[in-house]
Amino acid sequence: MIARLAILLCVLALPLRAEEIVADLSQNRIAITANFDGSEILIFGAIKRQSPIDTSNPLSVIVAISGPDEPLTVRRKSRALGIWINTAAVNVDRAPSFYAVSTTGPLRTVLTDTEDLRRKITIRRVIRSVGAPQNIMDPANFSEALIRLRERNQLYQLNEGGVSFADQTLFRSSVRLPSNLVEGIYTTRIFLTRDGHVVSSYTTSLDVQKVGLERWIFNLAHHQPLYYGLLSILIAVVAGWGASTVFRYIRG
Amino acid sequence: MQVYLPIAEVSVNVFLLLGLGGIVGVLSGMFGVGGGFLITPLLFFIGIPPAVAVATGTNQIVASSFSAVLAHLKRKTVDLKMGAVLLAGGLIGAALGVKLFAALKAIGQVDLLVQLSYVGFLGVIGLLMFVESLRAIRRARKPGGHIQRKSHTWIHALPLKVKFRTSGLYLSVIPPLVVGALVGVLSAIMGVGGGFIMVPAMIYLLGMPTKVVVGTSLFQIIFVTGFSTIMHAITDYSVDMALALFLLLGGVIGAQIGARMGARLKAEQLRILLAILVLAVCGKLALDLLIQPSELYSITAMEMHG
């Protein structure tokens, strides 16, 4: 990390645009092993500038990490004939499997609505739902429910004040990745804002991959499903026979 | 100790899985039910995605049923001939059930129908068994009271009679085929193994002795769940081998214990316990439907074909 910081500082010396982000992650790859129990990722960087710091109009930093997108169905129960059953469903075309936003201050002050709409920074702007069925009057409630449920599982996070920003130059933030992480390419976007407007942005990716036994099982299940099914049954039969033999042996 | 499950893509506690598998295994060995009704909701509860929970549950049931059947075979309480006939009927029924399910789905509101009929079915079976076994226990306590004789009915007049030696029956193959088919249809529609329905059907409709019923039911459950494990693996890749491994390690041990516990109980005691279990599951399902859930919304992976 020190080496990376050194490179960063060298880059800082080069002349470029007015204010620009230079950043990196503590690791570019996360390996999901059999005992994977979540991980923590550190995002750090600095602001490269040629002119003196404009102290009258301070900068803010927003960090957004997004997991692979997936299509979903959100269902809602309601009472029909006295019992509670799923009566309405809305398809969400694209929702990230993981999404974390960290900022230097309250979101309302660091980002304007128009900028959020354009850049799709907060989770509400990222989730894309093309059209609810005609009979559903309140599609917004479904995406709100999706966000609420995922926030409960730590899959969607909003951490206002989660980015520390020293002397308007150096920033750092750490994001907790939960244990129920899906593999794929995670995109990290960093935005530098002034008066709620984005003045610079930076994008990097993080590769989350299953490795070892996890990888082997996953590949077998997807590439050789019949053998995988047969192997699963073989394991079941052998375990069943093993337990029976052991118990017979114990009883004499 | 946590383990990350490669297909379910969540991290769970190993001892929790061993414990869950063990409890279901005990019930399986004791009553001859697969335990899918129990393992699937428990897996949902600890955060396993529904599709993976259903598919992996079937794999664990293969293991615990196989373990328990070996224990029953040793005591000669498995009627292999009867099991094979029931299984043949079951396969025909399952094929019909899949078609029927598709037809119901086309009409719509199939979820409601399935849930209501499931609750109704469990309630009726549970109550009938409870009342019957309570009477049997009272009768057994009364000195001089004699066990009711099996009466000759129209069932015994049917052709294609076969000797089922282990069950002590001389019966036409038609009733077991029909019972197997009906259970097959129901299990295809309701997505359950059918042990719950099969066990009472064998006791009351076919007149098999309770002790033989448990082992025979487990025998045919091995094949039904084995088949559905492979189907799930091929069609939606939802069997999680790592999850199954921990569940079945607990399950096979539990099944051995359950089979031994069951052997110590009297037939009517076994029936009354099973009746209570059936009623408890029915009550739980009924409450889920009647009480307003704290969270009305739920998320599922999108159905591509829907």
Image (cartoon, coloured by chain):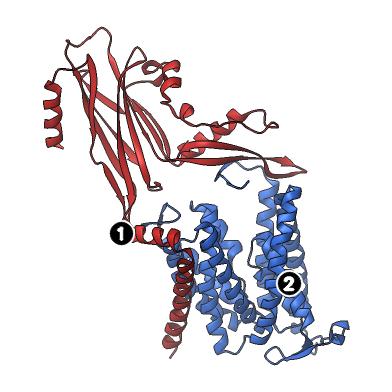
Viewer-nearest residue: B225 or A223: A223
Q: Position of residue B99 (x, y in %)?
A: 72, 60
Q: Identify residue type, mark 2.
A: Ala
Q: Secondary structure at mark 2?
A: helix
Residue ID for mark 1: A212
Subunit of mark 1? A
Marking on residue B181: 2
The N terminus of chain B lies in quadrant: bottom left
Which chain letter goes with mark 2? B
Q: Quadrant of residue B35?
A: bottom right
Q: Name chain B's colour.
A: blue
Q: Secondary structure at mark 1?
A: helix
Picture layout, residue B273 above or below residue A100: below
The residue under the point 84% across, 82% down is B155
Residue B295 in view in this figure = no
Taking the image as drawn, is residue A56 in sight?
yes
Q: Colour of chain A?
A: red
B76 displayed left or right of B135: left
Q: Position of residue A114 (x, y in %)?
A: 45, 16
C-alpha distance separating marks 2 and 1: 44 Å
Q: Is residue A194 above or below residue B184?
A: above
Q: At label 1, which amino acid type do we have?
A: Gly
Please tell me which residue lies in front, A234 or A101: A234
